[in-house]
Amino acid sequence: MKTFFAKSWVRRTIALALLTAVWEAAARTGLLNPLFFPAPSRVAAVAVELAIDGGIWVHLQATFSAAVLGLILGLALGILLGFLAALVPVLAELLEPVMILLNAIPRVIMAPLFVIWLGIDLSSKVALAVVLVAVLVFFAVYSGIKNVDRKLVERVVTLGGGRWVLVREVYIPSVTAQVMGSLKVAVGFAFTGAVVGEFVASTRGLGYLLQFAQSTYNAALSFALILLIMLFVLVLFSLAEALEHRLLRWRHR
Amino acid sequence: MLKVRNVSLAYGAEPVLENLDLDIATGAFVSLVGPSGSGKTSVLRAVTGLQTPLNGSVELDVDKCDVGFLFQDDALLPWRTARQNVALGLRIRGIAGDKALAEADSWLARLGLAGLEQRYPSQLSGGQRKRVAIAQVLALKPKLLLMDEPFASLDAIVRARITQELVDWVEREHMTVLLVTHDLEEALSTSDVVYLLSQGPRARIRSRYEVPIPRPRTLIETRKHPAFGALLDRLWCDLADEVNVAGAEAAQ
C-alpha cells in the first residue's frame, strides 16, 4: 500500500479526484453558483453531448489544423532564422532587434492585424501560431549555438573538422537539446495562437465556440471546451515527450 | 619536429608568455611545467592553431593533421557513443563510416574498453572516458602528440595505469610528445626533457632539465632511479623560488 502511494501519478490522480469531488459537492449544495461554476458532472455531460452530437468535430479539426500547422511552420522558421543569425553575424544584427521587439510584446495582440491581412480563414490563425512559436524557438536556437560548449568545438577542430562538421556534430545536436527543452512550451503557444485567432474572428474552431459560450453565458460549455483543449494539448505534450526521448536518448540512458 | 620561435601569447593587453623558443626533436618526450598562469596551455593552443601568437612563429615538420591534442577535459561529444566518438576523427579524415567504426572498436579494445563501445560518455567512468579520448587521438596515428594535463582529474591508481599505458604506446610508436603538467613527478618520470616556465605574466623558460633515465621506462622503476630524486629536488626548489620571487614582487 505504501509503495502504491509512493508513485507520483497515484498521488496526482487522487488529488485531482478530491478536487473534482469537492467542486461537485459545492456545486450541488449551492455553495457555488452553477451559472458561474457548473458541477463537473454537468461539464462532462456537455462534453459528451458535444461528442455525440458530432458538431464539435469541425471545430476541433479547425483548431487542431491551425495549431499543428503553426507549430510545424513556427519550428521550421525559428530553427532556420536562429541558425542563420548565429552563423552569419550580419543577419544577426538585422534579426535580433526584430526578435527582441516581438518577444517584448504580448504577440497575441497581432491577431487583429493578421485578420486584416489574411482574412478570417485558417491562414490568419496559422500566422499567429507561427509568430508565437518562431520567436520562442529562434531564441532557443540562437542562444543554443552562441552558448555551445567551446571545448567540444575545439575538440572537433583539433580532430580536423571544418565548418560543416562542426554544424553536424556539435551545433545541431547541441541545439536539438535546446529546442526539445522549449518544445512543450511551443505546443502551448501554438494552441494559444490558434484559439486566440479564432476568438478574434472566425466562423469555426474551439476559439469561436468559446466566444459563443461567453456571449450566451454558457459556463458549462466554456468548461467543456477548456477541458477538450487541455486534452489535446496533453496528447501533443506526450508526443513531444516521446520525440524528446528519441532524439535525446543519450541523456535518458 | 616542432620549432617555436620567439612566440609571445596574450589574452589581454599584457603577454602571458613572452619570446618563447622551444625545439622538440622527433621522438622526444618533452614536458612543460610552471606556476599557474605561466601560459603552458597557451603554448599547446598556439601549436594547434587554436590561438594566434602576438609575434613569433610555430614551425612543424609534419602536417597539421599529424598533430594530436589530448585535452585536460575528455571533451567527448555527449550525444555520440564511445565508438562514434573514436570514429569521428577517422571519418573526418575520409574513412568510410563502417570502416571507421570497425577501427574505432579495435582501438577501444586495445585500450581495454571492449564491450563498452555502445555506451554514451555519461555512462562511463572518468577513467573510461579518458581512455576513449586517448583512443580518439591515437586512432589518427599522430606523429606529434600534445597533452594538456590529460590525467589531472583521475584518481591516483587509474592515473598511474593510464599514464604507463600511454608511455608504453609512445615508446613503441616513437611518437613525439609535448606534455603540459603541474605534476613534477609525472613530468620527470615520462619525459626526456623538462622545461620550467617562470611566473607569468611575461613568462619565459626559466630552466631546462635533461632526464638521463633510459627507455623503455616503467613509472615506478623510474622513480627509484638515482637521478630521479636529485632532479625532482632541483625542480621543486627552482619552482618554489620562482613562486616566492613572484609572490614578493606582487607584494611590493
Image (cartoon, rainbow, N blue to C red):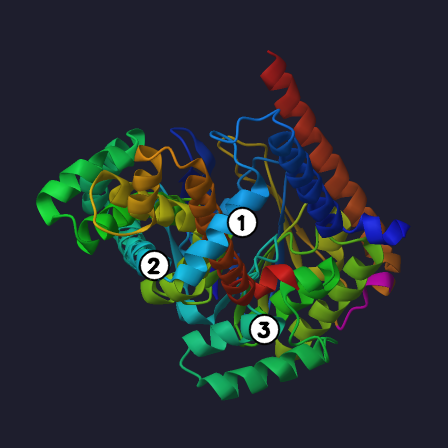
Dominant secondary structure of the magenta stretch? loop
Q: Residue at x 63, y 61 (%)?
A: A252
Q: Depth check: A229 or B175 in front? A: A229
- The range drawn in magenta is B216-220
Q: Are marks 1 and 3 on the same chain?
A: no
Q: Are marks 1 and 3 in contact (CB under 8 Å)?
A: no
Q: Is residue A75 above or below residue B204?
A: below
Residue B218 on the magenta segment? yes
Specify the amino acid type for callout 3.
Leu
The chain containing the residue under callout 2 comes to A
Which of discs 1 and 3 lies nearer the camera? The answer is: 1
Q: Are marks 1 and 2 in contact (CB under 8 Å)?
A: no
Q: Is residue A38 above or below residue B192?
A: above
* Quadrant including the C terminus of chain A: bottom right
Residue most toward the left? A117
Element assignment for label 1: helix
Percent x, y of residue A182: 45, 48
Element assignment for label 2: loop
Q: Depth check: B246 or A59 in front? A: A59
The chain containing the residue under callout 3 comes to B
Element assignment for label 3: helix
Q: Dot 2, how many residues are within 10 Å of its Cα: few (below 14), some (14-19), or many (20+)? A: few
CA–CA distance in space, label 1 to label 3 = 66 Å
Residue tagged by mark 3?
Answer: B138
Task: Pick whichever of labels 1 and 2 is earlier in the sequence.
Answer: 1
Q: Depth check: A101 or A2 in front? A: A2
Q: Is residue A104 above or below residue B77?
A: above
Which of discs 2 and 3 lies nearer the camera? The answer is: 2
Q: Which mark is residue A44?
A: 1
Q: Residue at x 71, y 64 (%)?
A: B124
Residue tagged by mark 2?
Answer: A55
